[in-house]
């Protein structure tokens, strides 16, 4: 089945929606699309064949109430394999900017045998067009006027059963609940779903989504995640600019599952809804840009991306049974990492003085540890002992490093 190029509850101008439940109280909506017999090989949106791909996206208007509480519904008794939902706009006009009043679950009814791709496979073909644009819980203040009592009415991003395999890559998310698995509702009764969904793909279920290190910088993105269970052992980290709207809105709801203690103030604070708004790029664990050889630990060289220090960064881990870049690769995508901001990456200047190196860097970058390696790429960096003495010259730290080896490479680490 192919469903492409439609405007659902959107007028022909593509930027004006007809919200059934707010425009006419006598009308009701069950869902925009129901597939009740067989969901195998369905393509909703672009098929990425290079012909009219941009025109194949479906535009879904806003909806706040439906009988089945979802935009899309697949009957749970059916099979649903090789489902592709790509390039569509949910709650967003055809201009990709206009946002509709929208709050509901994206889709329901996917059983444990489901295999689906929601978004791009990032195989280098039509990747940007394959991304869905998904806006929910908008406008937030209107839909959630009483924050202390709103969590019980919070819609899950989607509903699925353990065993389903969902590739969820490259999408643009704005204001949504936690995605793809909404594991917080303020009542403590849905967190276990997160473990159940990912347990057959991940070796370590206490690392169900990546943890990004606050020690990451504009030069190095560091973090940890679980390794994959065979055959899902190709580990790919997708990096995004986080959606500030979903993060702020989620914090305002103060859900118990997202509570943590601020180490500086000892006060209880709350994480928001982590999600990627803008896809930045993908990196392979133990690939050519990973400076950490330990599986499941990564230190990616991101210096070429010129990432800012004032924008939240998040990431997902993708466990694939196929090599990176495979078309429609068999991939399971985790929820998004708690976002971080990057530290500034200082410029290290070197000047050769006989058998020594004069190394300097800006004082506003902070302190570092000197490490060396006889080769690049380095199999292991060795911390210098003793550390070189550091002095301040104008606005720079300066240290003299004596080199007795035929060849040595140095770095500043922390």
Image (cartoon, rainbow, N blue to C red):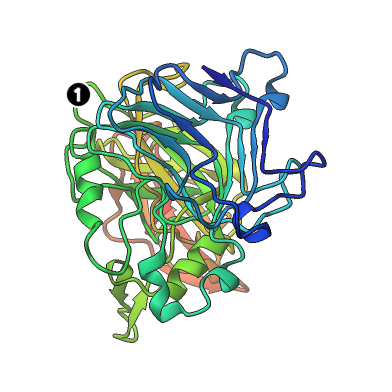
**Who's the residue at 67% across and 55% down the image?**
100
Above or below, 412 against 76 in this view is: below
Left or right of 342 in this view: 162: left
Image x and y of residue 121, in percent: 49, 25
Name the one closer to the observer, 338 or 163.
163
Q: Residue furthest front?
A: 26
Image x and y of residue 184, in percent: 32, 61
Q: Which image quadrant is residue 36 in?
A: top left
Above or below, 20 against 108 in this view is: below
Q: How many numbered discs sit on the rendered protein?
A: 1
**Who's the residue at 55% across and 29% down the image?**
86
Placement of the C terminus among the 4 image quadrants: bottom left
Image x and y of residue 85, in percent: 51, 30
**Who's the residue at 49% across and 64% down the image?**
247
Name the one closer to the observer, 367 or 108.
108
Number of residues whose C-alpha sits closer than 10 Å to that of mark 1, classed few (under 14), some (14–19) or many (20 or more):
some
Q: Which residue is mark 1?
A: 230
Q: Residue furthest right?
A: 13
Q: For the residue labelled by badge 1, is the local secondary structure a helix, a strand or a loop?
A: loop
**Who's the residue at 72% across and 18% down the image?**
52
């Amino acid at each position: 089945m192919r469903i492409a190029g439609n405007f659902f509850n959107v007028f022909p101008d593509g930027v004006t929606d007809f919200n059934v439940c707010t425009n006419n109280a006598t009308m009701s909506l069950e869902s925009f699309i129901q597939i009740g017999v067989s969901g195998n090989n369905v393509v909703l949106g672009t098929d990425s064949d290079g012909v009219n791909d941009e025109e194949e996206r479906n535009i879904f208007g806003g909806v706040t109430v439906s009988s089945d509480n979802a935009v899309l519904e697949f009957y749970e008794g059916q099979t649903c394999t090789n489902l592709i939902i790509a390039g569509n706009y949910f709650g967003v006009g055809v201009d990709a900017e206009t946002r509709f009043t929208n709050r509901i679950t994206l889709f329901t009814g996917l059983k444990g045998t489901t295999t689906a791709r929601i978004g791009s496979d990032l195989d280098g073909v039509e990747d940007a067009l394959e991304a869905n644009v998904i806006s929910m819980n908008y406008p937030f203040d209107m839909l959630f006027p009483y924050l202390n009592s709103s969590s019980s009415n919070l819609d899950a991003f989607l509903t699925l059963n353990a065993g389903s395999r969902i590739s969820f890559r490259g999408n643009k998310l704005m204001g949504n609940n936690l995605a793809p698995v909404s594991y917080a509702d303020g009542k403590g009764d849905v967190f276990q779903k997160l473990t159940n969904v990912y347990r057959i793909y991940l070796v370590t279920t206490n690392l169900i989504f990546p943890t990004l290190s606050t020690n990451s910088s504009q030069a190095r993105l560091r973090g940890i995640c679980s390794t994959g269970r065979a055959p899902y052992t190709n580990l790919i980290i997708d990096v995004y600019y986080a959606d500030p709207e979903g993060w702020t809105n989620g914090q305002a709801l103060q859900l118990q599952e997202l509570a943590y203690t601020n180490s500086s103030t000892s006060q209880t604070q709350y994480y928001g809804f982590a999600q990627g708004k803008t896809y930045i790029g993908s990196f392979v664990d133990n690939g050519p840009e990973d400076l950490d050889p330990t599986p499941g630990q990564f230190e990616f060289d991101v210096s070429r991306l010129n990432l800012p220090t004032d924008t939240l960064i998040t990431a997902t881990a993708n466990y694939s049974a196929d090599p990176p870049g495979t078309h429609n690769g068999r991939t399971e995508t985790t929820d998004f990492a708690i976002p971080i901001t990057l530290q500034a990456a200082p410029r290290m200047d070197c000047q050769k003085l006989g058998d020594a190196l004069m190394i300097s860097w800006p004082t506003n970058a902070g302190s570092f540890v000197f490490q060396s390696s006889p080769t690049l790429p380095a199999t292991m960096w060795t911390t210098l002992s003793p550390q070189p003495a550091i002095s301040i010259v104008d606005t720079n730290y300066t240290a003299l490093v004596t080199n007795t080896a035929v060849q040595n490479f140095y770095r500043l680490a922390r």
